[in-house]
Image (cartoon, grey):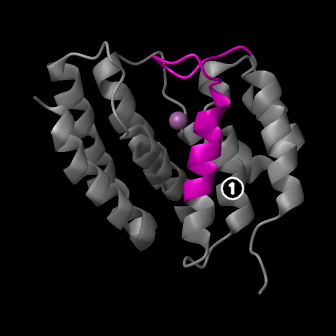
Amino acid sequence: MNLNWSQDNYIKAYKYAATAHQGQLYPGMKIPYIMHLSFVSMEIIGALSVEQCNGDLAVQCAILHDIIEDTDVTFGQLEAEFGLSVANGVQALTKDNNLPKHLQMSDSLQRIKEQPAEVWMVKLADRITNLQAPPHYWKRDKIIQYREEAICIYETLKDGSQFLASRLASKIENYKIYIQ
Ligand code: NI
């Protein structure tokens, strides 16, 4: 079987991300933040066994998806290291801090929609990963709002991957148990 993604590119992107995100922790836990990147890229690799697409683009964007938002790495550095398609994908996945907070997600989703389906897949995989048990300090309203936002992501990007969309739909359904 021919893989449509490269293990060597995975390793390169993962080392780069691990260095850039060094010292950051997973929200509400004392474990390294890069666990999140392992989960998101794992969801992508799972989807690649059934989706026909540019797996390399999807995997690299998955590993690097938070790097512009949460570290000092710039678009230009990303482009120089991983190429323009990856840099454009990550940029679309990055919230624009100049906008009011309540507009940042819809703005990012619109920019993701202008990117190839591989970038849509990363956003679906990101929210699948994030619909685990919410951090202990989240209030009920925040949990409800996070679920609503997940529904919006699903509605906007479901055509990016049938496999990931159906997995996200079941996570959204299950997330109801955290709304008490
Ligand atoms: Ni993320």
Q: Is residue 106 above or below residue 69?
A: below
Tag 1, which secondary structure?
Answer: helix
Q: Is residue 174 left or right of residue 81?
A: left
The C terminus appears in which quarter of the rendering? top left
Report the span colored magenta: 23-43
- Residue at position x 28%, y 17% in the image: 138
The count of marks equals 1
Q: Is residue 23 above or below residue 178?
A: above
Question: Which quadrant of the view contains residue 157?
Answer: bottom left
Whether residue 62 is visible to the viewer of this picture, yes or no, is yes
Q: Is residue 28 above or below residue 123?
A: above
- Residue at position x 72%, y 50% in the image: 60
- Residue at position x 48%, y 48% in the image: 123
The N terminus appears in which quarter of the rendering? bottom right
Observer-nearest of 97 and 61? 61
Residue type at mark 1 is Val
According to the image, label 1 marks what residue? 59
Question: Most extreme residue toward the bottom, as rendered?
Answer: 1
Locate residue 154, reporting x and y percent.
31, 54
- Residue at position x 78%, y 30% in the image: 18
Observer-nearest of 43 and 77? 43
Question: Which quadrant of the view contains residue 47?
Answer: bottom right
